[in-house]
Amino acid sequence: MTYNMSADIDDVIELNVGGVHYTTTRKTLTSDKNSRLAELFDKDNQSSSSLIRDGKGRIVLDRDGVLFRFILDYLRDDTIQLPDGFREKRRLEREAEYFKLDGLIQSMHTLNDTHNGCITIGYRGSFQFGKDGLADVKFRKLSRILICGRVNLCRDVFGDTLNESRDPDHGGPTSHRYTSRFFLKHQFIEQAFDMLHEQGFRLVGCCGSGTSAPAAELKPGIDAEESRWSHYNEFVFIRE
């Protein structure tokens, strides 16, 4: 048996993708014959001779180096598996479009379909007033932003900003579990809205309630005037 070392070495490709270095094979890079990578790295394609190399001889691709690992994963296995809380699906889809990986784009759409659903955001708040009961509203106060919905969907959208310590139900697959006990580690309702918008959710409904007078007995430290303006609001978002 003759071992052709030169042929094997020629099929090992060193890449510099946006400053991130990868080692792969020509077989992997050309596995999708209709892709831009196949056009670049096919031995019979003349365009491969025009590839730019860095100082160490690695072929330079001026694309997102971090996301390129998912491109390679797809080319190796013909499937895609993203980590929990992955927040760059749209950027990855753009990379797939650039490399002409129609199969990966379709897989991304299918993946998004399994993460469709509703998330409800609720918060209890009040308005902070000036000293001595002046009617000059200073700012809005939020005590906590509550998150309700399917567990894996909430994690997918809010990632590490989600506080799960109040959720006692850890049994069963998260794809089928729902919770009304999550809340956010911050108190910025607009940030929560931005995160939902970035993940393709839209507002479909909202409701609110408030008090018109303070309770008969207030807890120590609670301002009577401020308590008159306490309110609770909920916002329902959907991705489909």
Image: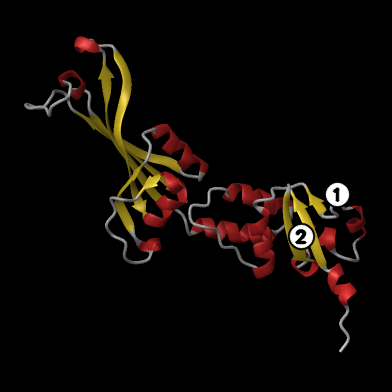
Q: Which mark is residue 198?
A: none
Say if residue 14 shows up in the picture. yes
Residue situated in front as seen by the camera: 64 or 216:
64
Instruction: Say what secondary structure mark 2 lies in.
Output: loop
Left or right side of 159 for 224: left
In the picture as drawn, the residue positioned furthest to the left comes out as 216
* Mark 1 to mark 2 CA distance (whole Å): 27 Å
Q: What amino acid is at disc 2?
A: Ser
Up the image or down, 234 lies above or below 214; here it is below
Left or right side of 153 for 227: left
Residue situated in front as seen by the camera: 195 or 237:
195
To which residue does mark 2 refer? 35
Residue 205: x percent and y percent?
36, 39
Up the image or down, 184 lies above or below 34; here it is above
Q: Which mark is residue 55?
A: 1
Q: For the point 78% across and 70% down, which residue is it? A: 27
Tag 2 or tag 1, which sits nearer the N-term? 2
